[in-house]
Amino acid sequence: MTTEKENTPSRQSRDSETHEKETRRQPWRPVRKLETPPAPEGYEYRWIRESMLGQEDRGNVSRRLREGWELVRGTDLPQEFQLPTYDSGRHAGVVYNEGLLLAKMPIETIKERNNYYAGKSQQAREALDNNVFQEANKDSRYVKYDADRKPNVTFGKK
């Protein structure tokens, strides 16, 4: 005769079972060379060239620092991100990757810089328009200039 305990299924929690997603093999993917952790709130990360073809590029680093970029130290990153840092020299403790240094800048400053260069571009366009219009008005042989620029990218035949 069988007892009642033998017929009832065991009552283990489902959390103790291993699921397929935990044991599933992950497919191979290429390494992302310039992978960075998420930037801190209000900042943006960017890689700055420190050397090229084995030659130091101190001028580039100096210009970027004067623009407002700050070099990121390995101690500033979250614990789960272990990126290489320089052991000694001018950039000791700074995150690097194949001749590039990791830097950060406040988003407000980035927007101000982008607005500055957009204004410079607009001034150059206006100067070109004014110059071409003046030339076209002096000489009737010029093709009438249409200042309405619209970039069009087409592929193949229309």
Image (cartoon, helix red, strand yellow):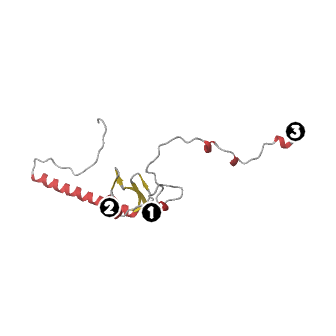
Q: Do the residues labelled 2 and 3 touch (CB within 8 Å)?
A: no
The location of residue 32, given as percent across then percent down, is: 45, 47
Q: Distance between the residues labelled 2 and 3?
A: 85 Å
Q: Which of marks 2 and 3 is in front?
A: 2
Q: Residue furthest right?
A: 1
Q: What element carries label 3?
A: loop
Q: Quadrant of residue 61?
A: bottom left
Q: Residue 135 carries which label?
A: none
Q: Which of 14 and 148 is in front in this view?
A: 14
Q: How far apart are marks 2 and 1 (CA)?
A: 22 Å
Q: Which of disc 3 and disc 2 is earlier in sequence?
A: 3
Question: What kind of residue is marked 3?
Answer: Thr
Q: Mark 3 points at which residue?
A: 2
In this rendered view, identify the residue nearer to me: 13 or 122.
13
SS at mark 2? helix
The residue under the point 72% across, 48% down is: 13
Tell me what residue is drawn at x 41 percent, y 51 percent: 98
Q: Is residue 106 visible?
A: no
Residue closest to the eye, 73 or 92 = 92
Amino acid beneath label 2: Arg
| 62 left or right of 80 in image | left
Q: Mark 2 points at which residue?
A: 63
Callout 1: few (<14), some (14-19), or many (20+) C-alpha neighbours within 10 Å?
Answer: few
**Residue at mark 1:** 42
Residue 83 location (% of width, % of height): 48, 55
Q: Which of 31 and 13 is in front in this view?
A: 31
- The tag earlier along the polypeptide, 3 or 1, is 3
What's the distance in space between the residues labelled 3 and 1, CA to CA?
A: 69 Å
Element type where label 1 sits in the image: loop
